[in-house]
C-alpha cells in the first residue's frame, strides 16, 4: 500500500488520504508545520468521538449556515482549509454571498501566494492577498 494507492476497505482509508493531501500541501508551501500538528490534534478528537458527527454538531452547522446567510459574512481560510477543501469554500462563498479572506498565523508572501490555490476553483476576490485587498475592519 502506497500513500496514493490506499485500499477503499482500509478502516482508516479516508484519514490516510487526507493525511497524504496534507503532506503534499506542506511540501508545496500551502501548509505550515504547525498546520500539520493541528490537523493531527483534530484527528485525535475525531477518533475519541468515534468519527461521527453528533446531534449538537449538526445543529451547530445549521446555525452557522443561518449566520452566513443573514450577515455580511467572511469565510476565513487558513492553510488547512485551503489544502483540504478549496473547492467547497468557493462553493459555500457563492451560495451564501460571503467574502473570502486569507488568514494565516504563520504568514509569508509565499504562503499567501500558495493559498491563492482557491482561485483555481473560481474565487475571484480574495481579501488579505495583498495590502490593497484588506477588509476595511482589518486595517
Image: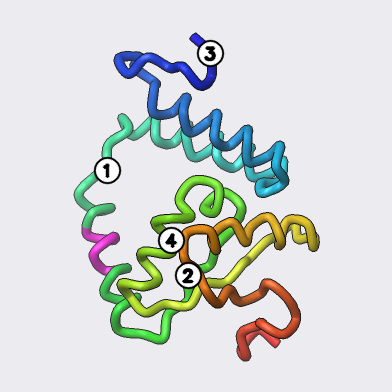
Query: Any mark on residue 89, and which?
Result: 4
- Residue carrying label 3: 2
Q: Is residue 98 shown above or below 48?
A: below
Query: Label 4 vs label 1: CA separation?
Result: 20 Å
Residue 11 x/y as whole percent: 34, 17
Query: Label 3 vs label 4: CA separation?
Result: 29 Å
Residue 107 x/y as whole percent: 76, 60
Is 10 left or right of 125, judged from the image as shown?
left
Query: Label 1 vs label 2: CA separation?
Result: 22 Å
Q: Are marks 2 and 4 in contact (CB under 8 Å)?
A: yes
Secondary element at image label 3: loop
Query: Any mark on residue 75, and which?
Result: 2
Sequence-earlier tag: 3 or 4 = 3
Query: Crowding at label 3, few (<14), some or many (≥20) Cα neighbours within 10 Å?
Result: few
Foreground mark, 2 or 4, reads 4
- Residue 60 colored in magenta in the image: yes
Q: Is residue 69 shown above or below 35?
A: below
Secondary element at image label 4: helix
Sequence-earlier tag: 3 or 1 = 3
Sequence-earlier tag: 1 or 2 = 1
Is 35 left or right of 75, judged from the image as shown?
right
Foreground mark, 3 or 1, reads 3
Q: Is residue 67 shown above or below 77?
A: below
Which residue is found at the position 54% from the left and 53% from the top? Answer: 82
- Residue carrying label 1: 53
Q: Are marks 3 and 4 in contact (CB under 8 Å)?
A: no
Amino acid at each position: 500500500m502506497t500513500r496514493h494507492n490506499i485500499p477503499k476497505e482500509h478502516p482508516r482509508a479516508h484519514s490516510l488520504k487526507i493525511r497524504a493531501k496534507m503532506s503534499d500541501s506542506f511540501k508545496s508551501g500551502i501548509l505550515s508545520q504547525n498546520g500539520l500538528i493541528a490537523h493531527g490534534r483534530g484527528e485525535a478528537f475525531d477518533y475519541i468521538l468515534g468519527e461521527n458527527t453528533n446531534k449538537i454538531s449538526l445543529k451547530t452547522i445549521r446555525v452557522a449556515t443561518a449566520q452566513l446567510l443573514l450577515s455580511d459574512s467572511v469565510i476565513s481560510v487558513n492553510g488547512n482549509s485551503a489544502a483540504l477543501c478549496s473547492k467547497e469554500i468557493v462553493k459555500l462563498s457563492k451560495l451564501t454571498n460571503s467574502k473570502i479572506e486569507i488568514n494565516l498565523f504563520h504568514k509569508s508572501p509565499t504562503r499567501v501566494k500558495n493559498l491563492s490555490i482557491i482561485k483555481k476553483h473560481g474565487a475571484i476576490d480574495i481579501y488579505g492577498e495583498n495590502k490593497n485587498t484588506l477588509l476595511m475592519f482589518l486595517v
